[in-house]
Amino acid sequence: MSGAGEPVKIGNVLHPVADVAAALRFYEGVFGLERRFVDGDRFAALDAGGTTLALAGPAEDVTGGVPAASFKVADVAASVAAIVGAGGSVVREPEQGPHEVRAVVRDPWGNVLVVYGRG
């Protein structure tokens, strides 16, 4: 459910970490990933060659420690309804986060996904 003719894309791969600063040092040092955005100890985004690796600290870990693909959509509520209608389930209802509206869902096979977009 992208709306307005925009294709849905994976905006990032969410990777929960206990320590954002340590994770930044690791992923920058080991893989040479470039820092795109950092929000203190809450969240960091790294360029992983066309895909964003999103490091979520404990305050931003909406998936309970599970890595998840995050889909950027035009309408979070409509996307959640479509997921449920197609056999998925809701883990966390849509909520306003510090940077966007987001929801956590499971696909029909139990995989955790995040859907997010503008408020």
Image: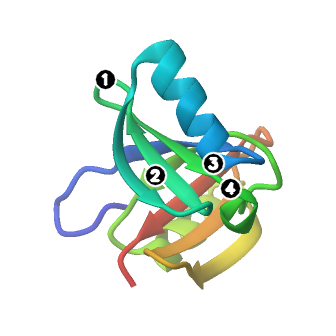
Q: Which residue is mark 3?
A: 20
Residue position marked by numbered label 2 in the rendering: 71
Mark 1 and mark 3: Cα distance apart in space: 20 Å
Marks 3 & 4, CB-CB < 8 Å contact: yes
Q: Is residue 101 above or below residue 89?
A: below
Circle 2 crowding by C-alpha within 10 Å: few under 14, some 14–19, many from 20: many
Dot in front, 2 or 1: 1
Callout 4: few (<14), some (14-19), or many (20+) C-alpha neighbours within 10 Å?
A: many
Residue 49, disc: 1
**Residue drawn at (63%, 48%) of the image:** 20
From the image, state whether disc 4 or disc 2 is nearer to you. Answer: 4
* Residue 113 on image: x %, y %: 63, 50
Circle 2/circle 1 CB separation < 8 Å: no
- Report how far apart the C-alphas of labels 2 and 3 lie in the structure: 22 Å
Q: Amino acid at mark 1?
A: Gly
In the picture, the disc for residue 57 is: 4
The residue lying at 61 percent from left, 69 percent from top is: 103
Secondary structure state at the residue bearing disc 1: loop
Quarter of the picture containing the C terminus is: bottom left
Residue type of the residue flagged with mark 4: Gly
49 or 94: nearer the viewer: 49
- The x, y position of residue 97, in whole percent, is 55, 78
Badge number at residue 7: none
Q: Which amino acid, by three-letter code, is at mark 3?
A: Val
Q: Secondary structure at mark 3?
A: helix
Check the image and name the residue furthest to the top: 30
Answer with mark 3 or mark 4, whichever residue precedes in sequence.
3
Regarding mark 4 in the picture, which secondary structure is present there?
Answer: loop
Which residue occupies 31% across, 23% down? 49
Question: In the picture, residue 66 is in which quadrant?
Answer: top right
Residue 42 in sight from this viewpoint? yes
Q: Give the left or right position of residue 75, taking residue 69 as reference.
A: left
